[in-house]
Amino acid sequence: MKAIVVYESHWGNTEAIAQAVAAGFGPGAEALTTDEASSAALVDVDLLVAGAPLIAFSLPSDKTRTAIAAGSGEAPTPPDLSHQSLSSWLESLPRGQGRSASFETRMRWSPGGATGAIDRGLERAGYRPVGKGRRFVVMGKYGPLRDGEIELAHRWGAELAVIVKSERSVQATR
Ligand SMILES: Cc1cc2nc3c(=O)[nH]c(=O)nc-3n(C[C@H](O)[C@H](O)[C@H](O)COP(=O)(O)O)c2cc1C
């Protein structure tokens, strides 16, 4: 069973969730940046999970990333913008046949969302979502993650593994 959790993360919150989802899935799963998640890395993937922060109410675009790079001076550390955006990664995602899942990190009470756009990108490439996109909550504009979110992400990864593995075993008996 092969699972890839690909993420965009400027301040590390989404990366921490991606690592926890991969760890929860178990052996065969790894969390990769958008640049690491190349076509070669995705060959024969059974489950492709993609996650990003919610920025200005949606999946970060190149325009919002430019605004982040310009900065407001209040960020605790400089943002990591060294990897391509998840949005552009999705646009060039090669066709695949596996299942998919999406998540976003965000503040509790914000309008908007990123997982809808992520799911659409994954589906355009042929991936079939396992369920609704998941939200993981941060306490402030730059984090940290709310207590318990890492554990929830780990548990979600384990749940995804059960779903995908049981589908595979049903297919194998046909
Ligand atoms: C410029 C900026 C805009 C943001 N816009 C939103 C937003 O519209 N809604 C929201 O819930 N959170 C928003 N956030 C909070 C981020 O979604 C949150 O900190 C996220 O976990 C960052 O993920 P990262 O550490 O992986 O980059 C914003 C943060 C920044 C810095």
Image (tube, rainbow, N blue to C red):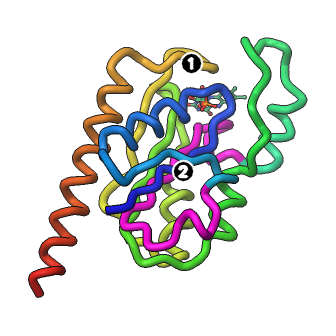
Q: What stretch is highlighted in magenta?
A: 37-60
Question: Ligand 1: which quarter?
Answer: top right
- Check if mark 1's residue and mark 2's residue have beta carbons within 8 Å: no
Q: What residue is at 26 percent from the left and 36 percent from the top? A: 155
| Residue at the outermost bottom position | 174
The amino acid at mark 1 is: Gly
Q: Residue at x 84, y 19 (%)?
A: 72
Decide if ligand 1 comes within 8 Å of the CB at mark 1.
yes
Within the magenta stretch, is there residue 53?
A: yes
Q: In this view, does 49 lie above or below 90?
A: above
**Is 153 colored magenta in this rendering?**
no
* 142 w.r.t. 19: above or below: above
Quadrant of the drawing holding the C terminus: bottom left
Residue at the image position 49 percent from the left and 22 percent from the top: 138
Task: State left or right for residue 168 relative to residue 47.
Answer: left
* Quarter holding residue 52: top right
Question: Whole-percent x and y of residue 60?
Answer: 69, 45
Give the total of numbered labels.
2
Earlier sequence position, callout 1 versus callout 2 = 2
Which element type, helix, strand or loop, lies under badge 1? Answer: loop
Near-viewer residue (14 or 124): 14
- The residue that appears at 25% across and 62% down in the rendered structure is 164
What label does residue 6 carry, if any? 2
